[in-house]
C-alpha cells in the first residue's frame, strides 16, 4: 500500500514537472513540434505496453473507434494545442493553477449533459474553486476577467481545462464499453494517443513541416522525452494501477498535488516568482476540488 501512495506522489510531481518541461521546450521549439514529438514517443510506448499486457493490439468496434477519435481530438490534439501555445504566454505555476479548475468544469458538464446529481456540498466546492481560478487569472482581482483584461495565456489554459473535461466525459463511455470486453483504460488511452498524434502530425505538416526537423538542443529533447515518456506513459500507468488498488476517489485526491508541484518546480527550475494572488487563488481552487471529492457522509461525520 505504501508503494502505491509513493507512486501517486511521484506521479503528481512528474505531472507538475510537465508544466515546467513544456514552458522550457516552447522557448526553443514550436508548440506543434513539441506536441508531435511528445506523442510520437508516448503513443509508441503505450502501444508497446498494450502488446505486453494483452499479447496483441485489440480491435475496436465502430462505436469504440468513434470514441477514440473523440478522445484523440479533445484530450490529445486540442488540449496540447491550448497547452503548448498557452505556455508561451504564462508561467508554469500559474498555468497549472488555472487548469486545476478542470474537475469543477467536468462536474458541471456531467450534471448538465449526463444528468448527474448536484448537491449543496458540490455547489459550494464549485463556487470556491471557480472564485479561486478567477483570482489566479485576474492576478489578484477575481473580477478582472469580466472586464476583458485577461492575457492570452490564461485563456488558452482555460481551453485546456475545457478540453480535458470533454476528454473525461467521453472517456467514461469508452472505458465502460471496453470493460465489458475485459480490456482496461490503457487500450483506450493508447489508441487515443495514436489518433491525437496523427491529428497533430497532419496539422504540423500542413502548417510548416520544417518545425518537425529534429534539430533541437539536448535540453529541449530532454523536455520532450519527459513530456512523452514520463508525463504521459509512466504517469498514466502508475495512476491507473493506483486506481485499481485503492479506487478512483482516493487516487484522484493526489491530483491536487500537481499544481503545488508545478508552482514549486517552476520557482526552483525556471526562477518563476510565486506571488500572493497565485497562492490565494490556488489554495481556493484546491480547497474547492477537495470538497468536491469528499463524500457528503464524511462531512456530516466531521461536523458531528
Image: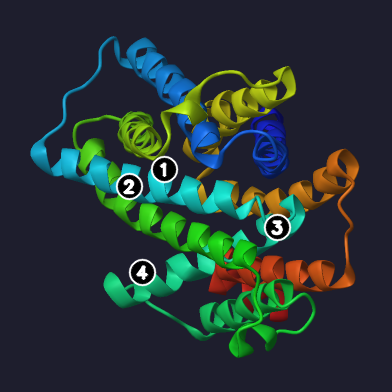
Residue that badge 1 annotates: 76
Q: Is residue 66 left or right of residue 167?
A: left
Residue that badge 3 annotates: 90
C-alpha distance separating marks 1 and 3: 20 Å
C-alpha distance separating marks 1 and 2: 6 Å
Question: Is disc 1 in contact with disc 2, using a CB cutoff of under 8 Å?
Answer: yes
Task: Determine if residue 282 is in view.
Answer: yes
Mark on residue 73?
A: 2
Lower position in the chain sequence, tag 1 or tag 4: 1
Quarter of the image for residue 94 reads bottom right
Q: Which of marks 3 and 2 is in front?
A: 3
Mark on residue 110?
A: 4
Q: Which colour scheme is used?
A: rainbow
Lower position in the chain sequence, tag 2 or tag 4: 2
Q: In this view, does 238 lie above or below 113?
A: above
Q: Is mark 3 on a helix, strand or loop?
A: loop
Q: What element carries label 1?
A: helix
Residue 276 at x, y percent in the picture: 88, 71
Amino acid at each position: 500500500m505504501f508503494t502505491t501512495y509513493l507512486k501517486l506522489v511521484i506521479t503528481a510531481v512528474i505531472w507538475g514537472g510537465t508544466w515546467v518541461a513544456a514552458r522550457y521546450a516552447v522557448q526553443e521549439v514550436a508548440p506543434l513540434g513539441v506536441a508531435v514529438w511528445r506523442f510520437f514517443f508516448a503513443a509508441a510506448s503505450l502501444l508497446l505496453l498494450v502488446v505486453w499486457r494483452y499479447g496483441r493490439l485489440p480491435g475496436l468496434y465502430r462505436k469504440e473507434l468513434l470514441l477514440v477519435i473523440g478522445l484523440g481530438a479533445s484530450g490529445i490534439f486540442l488540449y496540447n494545442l491550448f497547452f503548448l501555445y498557452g505556455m508561451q504566454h504564462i508561467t508554469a505555476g500559474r498555468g497549472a493553477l488555472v487548469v486545476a479548475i478542470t474537475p469543477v468544469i467536468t462536474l458541471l458538464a456531467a450534471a448538465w449533459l449526463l444528468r448527474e446529481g448536484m448537491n449543496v456540498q458540490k455547489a459550494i466546492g464549485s463556487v470556491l474553486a471557480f472564485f479561486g481560478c478567477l483570482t489566479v487569472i485576474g492576478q489578484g482581482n477575481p473580477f478582472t476577467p469580466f472586464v476583458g483584461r485577461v492575457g492570452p495565456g490564461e485563456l488558452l489554459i482555460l481551453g485546456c481545462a475545457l478540453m480535458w473535461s470533454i476528454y473525461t466525459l467521453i472517456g467514461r463511455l469508452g472505458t465502460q464499453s471496453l470493460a465489458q470486453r475485459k480490456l482496461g483504460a490503457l487500450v483506450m488511452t493508447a489508441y487515443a494517443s495514436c489518433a491525437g498524434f496523427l491529428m497533430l502530425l497532419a496539422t504540423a505538416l500542413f502548417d510548416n513541416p520544417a518545425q518537425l526537423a529534429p534539430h533541437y538542443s539536448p535540453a529541449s529533447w530532454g523536455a520532450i522525452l519527459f513530456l512523452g515518456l514520463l508525463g504521459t506513459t509512466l504517469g498514466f500507468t502508475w495512476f491507473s494501477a493506483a486506481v485499481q488498488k485503492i479506487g478512483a476517489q482516493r487516487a484522484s485526491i493526489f491530483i491536487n498535488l500537481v499544481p503545488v508541484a508545478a508552482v514549486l518546480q517552476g520557482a526552483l527550475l525556471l526562477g518563476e516568482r510565486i506571488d500572493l494572488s497565485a497562492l490565494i487563488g490556488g489554495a481556493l481552487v484546491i480547497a474547492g476540488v477537495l470538497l468536491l471529492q469528499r463524500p457528503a457522509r464524511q462531512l456530516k461525520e466531521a461536523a458531528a
